[in-house]
């Protein structure tokens, strides 16, 4: 990224659709059209993997597989893999994802699409499917067996399966692979559908001058294909249970810290294998996205290690990570073509700063944190606009923050007064004032959640760290992205020199005026 651009943070699940959850179909294409009309340059998403218990995109069943819930039934209908009479569409809410009902409904649709594929004449699709299976065999085979076994065991975690399966005894794997062969192929086909639709969406975004930013969590879920398939990469006991887990110490979001529960990497073992797991992750993400954001980047310098028996994250300790050596190993093996954004929030120590400087990755600045700092007498916070860096990404807030309006409604008068004076505003449209501040920043890239562009309140917050219910559900209704909203955003974007494809658009506009 070497030009001033801006964009929007929005997970595809939040898009409007009649299917109860946003997906990669018409709603996603229309959102790209909105971004193009307002001359934005990027669309940032959350991790795209299949979610498990809690529906968090940061706790997925695989670091490589795609989320089946994002497959568009509209596109399946277009390709003939579904027929109108194949299903009865329930009445889903428009303003949030009802995961409990959406998940079984969509899996039913996908099973029907696979059945139609098997009995129909889909030679072109079959060719693409076979190519996909060959190209992704390295992770696909393990994941599909894992998913089939998990379904057979009614969703129970892999450590509750038979000892032979937990320990991945070859005879047990062979026996179950044969027994669950049809289900394994079904999961394989579902993964093909996800990646087939994804590549089409990515191509469309590229044609509209929109870069897609993907998110790669540093840790993986314990109940995942990755941990089950490669237990030697993690600190586990003989039963497969983590001995230590990941999290962060007490911080802005929680007085007791955050105990995420993910197993921690055995970095020594990974290094012996030349970090093959991480190389493969970056290969996959690099083929999907134009930019990669690394969540919890500081964990590569040192991570907060919590004994598994601890109920909170208070009694943990810092343990050294692989440092810049990991990224140099990745670069040696796959190159360094895809730009990287480092999420460098939280407790940032000297080793994190030195690693960022060595690698040259842009870090992040969160406006909400900058203005809150005045409460502690820290009005020189690095997150305030006058302290931003050129090689940096500025956000009004992230998926973990409250919306700008929700944040504003909770601030003490000291913060409100400072913010009004700093931004020279009355706070009546604070969401717009903050977006303008982000756009005006010297930082090369400015990003804001769609909730902030729409001026929505706390009820539309995507995630509240430390809580386990009500997260990841928000959706916006069809029609919310009006032409007037696009025009207003375009004017602000032009004002601060962040427009994309300006030359092409000006030629188009000139042609329209002549007509």
Image (cartoon, rainbow, N blue to C red):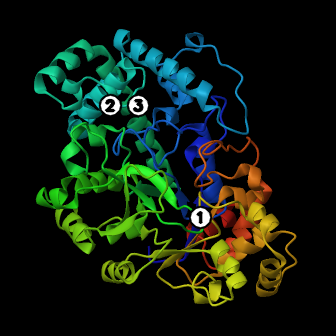
Camera-nearest residue between 425 and 199: 425
Q: Position of residue 420 (x, y in %)?
A: 82, 81
Label 1 sits on residue = 255
Camera-nearest residue between 272 and 390: 272
Quarter of the image with the C terminus is: bottom right
- Secondary structure beneath dot 3 equals helix
Disc 2 + disc 1, Cβ < 8 Å = no
Q: Does label 2 or label 1 sit earlier along the sequence?
A: 2
| Nearer the camera: disc 3 or disc 1 | 1
Quarter of the image with the N terminus is: bottom left
- Give the residue displayed 70% in from the left and 56% down from the top: 451
Residue 153 against residue 330 in the figure, above or below = above
Q: Is residue 62 visible?
A: yes
Q: Tag 3: Cα neighbours inside 10 Å, few (<14), some, or many (≥20)?
A: many
- Mark number for residue 77? none
Residue 452 against residue 393 in the figure, above or below = above
- Give the residue displayed 44% in from the left and 42% down from the top: 198
Q: Tag 1: Cα neighbours inside 10 Å, few (<14), some, or many (≥20)?
A: few
- Secondary structure beneath dot 1 equals loop
Disc 3 + disc 1, Cβ < 8 Å = no
Q: Position of residue 158 (x, y in %)?
A: 32, 31
Label 2 sits on residue = 158
Q: Does label 3 or label 1 sit earlier along the sequence?
A: 3
Q: Position of residue 162 (x, y in %)?
A: 25, 23
Q: Tag 2: Cα neighbours inside 10 Å, few (<14), some, or many (≥20)?
A: many
| Nearer the camera: disc 2 or disc 3 | 2
- Secondary structure beneath dot 2 equals helix
Disc 2 + disc 3, Cβ < 8 Å = no
Label 3 sits on residue = 193
Camera-nearest residue between 462 and 436: 462
């Amino acid at each position: 990224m070497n030009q001033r651009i801006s964009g929007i943070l929005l997970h595809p699940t939040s898009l409007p659709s009649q299917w109860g959850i946003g997906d990669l179909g018409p709603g996603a294409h229309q959102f790209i059209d909105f971004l193009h009309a307002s001359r934005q340059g990027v669309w940032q998403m959350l991790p795209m993997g299949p979610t498990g218990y809690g529906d968090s995109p940061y706790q997925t069943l695989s670091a490589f597989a795609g989320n089946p819930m994002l497959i568009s039934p509209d596109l399946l209908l277009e390709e003939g893999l579904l027929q109108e009479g194949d299903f009865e569409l329930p009445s889903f809410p428009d303003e949030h994802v009802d995961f409990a009902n959406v998940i079984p409904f969509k899996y039913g649709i996908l099973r029907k699409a696979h059945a139609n594929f098997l009995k129909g004449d889909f030679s072109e699709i079959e060719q693409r499917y076979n190519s996909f299976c060959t190209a992704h065999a390295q992770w696909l085979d393990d994941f599909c067996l894992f998913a089939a076994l998990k379904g057979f065991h009614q969703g129970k975690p892999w450590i509750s399966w038979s000892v032979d399966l937990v320990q991945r005894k070859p005879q047990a794997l062979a026996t179950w692979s044969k027994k669950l062969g049809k289900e394994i192929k079904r999961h394989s086909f579902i993964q093909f559908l996800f990646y087939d639709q994804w590549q089409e969406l990515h191509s469309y975004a590229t044609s509209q001058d929109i870069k897609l930013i993907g998110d790669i969590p540093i840790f993986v879920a314990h109940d995942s294909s990755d941990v089950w398939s490669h237990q030697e990469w993690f600190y586990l006991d003989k039963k497969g249970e983590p001995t230590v887990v990941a999290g962060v110490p007490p911080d802005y979001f929680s007085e007791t810290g955050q105990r995420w529960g993910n197993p921690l990497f055995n970095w020594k073992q990974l290094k012996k294998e030349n970090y093959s797991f991480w190389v493969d992750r970056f290969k996959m993400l690099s083929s999907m996205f134009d930019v990669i954001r690394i969540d919890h980047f500081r964990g590569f310098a040192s991570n907060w290690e919590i004994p598994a028996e601890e109920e909170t994250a208070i009694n943990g300790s810092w343990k050294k990570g692989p440092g810049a050596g990991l990224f140099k190993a990745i670069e040696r093996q796959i190159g360094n073509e895809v730009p990287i954004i480092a999420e460098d929030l939280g407790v940032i120590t000297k080793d994190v700063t030195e690693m960022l400087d060595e690698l040259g990755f842009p870090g992040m600045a969160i406006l909400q944190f900058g203005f809150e700092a005045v409460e502690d007498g820290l009005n020189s916070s690095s997150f305030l606009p006058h302290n931003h860096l050129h090689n940096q990404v500025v956000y009004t807030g992230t998926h973990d923050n409250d919306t700008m309006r929700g944040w504003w409604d909770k601030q003490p008068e000291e913060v409100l007064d400072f913010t009004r004076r700093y931004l020279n505003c009355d706070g009546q449209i604070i969401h717009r004032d903050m977006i303008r501040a982000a756009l005006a920043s010297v930082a090369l890239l400015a990003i804001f959640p769609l909730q902030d562009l729409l001026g929505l309140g706390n009820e539309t917050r995507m995630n509240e760290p430390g809580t386990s219910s009500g997260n990841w559900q928000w959706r916006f209704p069809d029609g919310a992205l009006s032409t007037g909203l696009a025009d207003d955003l375009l004017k602000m974007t032009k004002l601060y020199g962040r427009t994309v494809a300006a030359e092409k658009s000006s030629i188009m506009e000139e042609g329209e005026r002549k007509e």
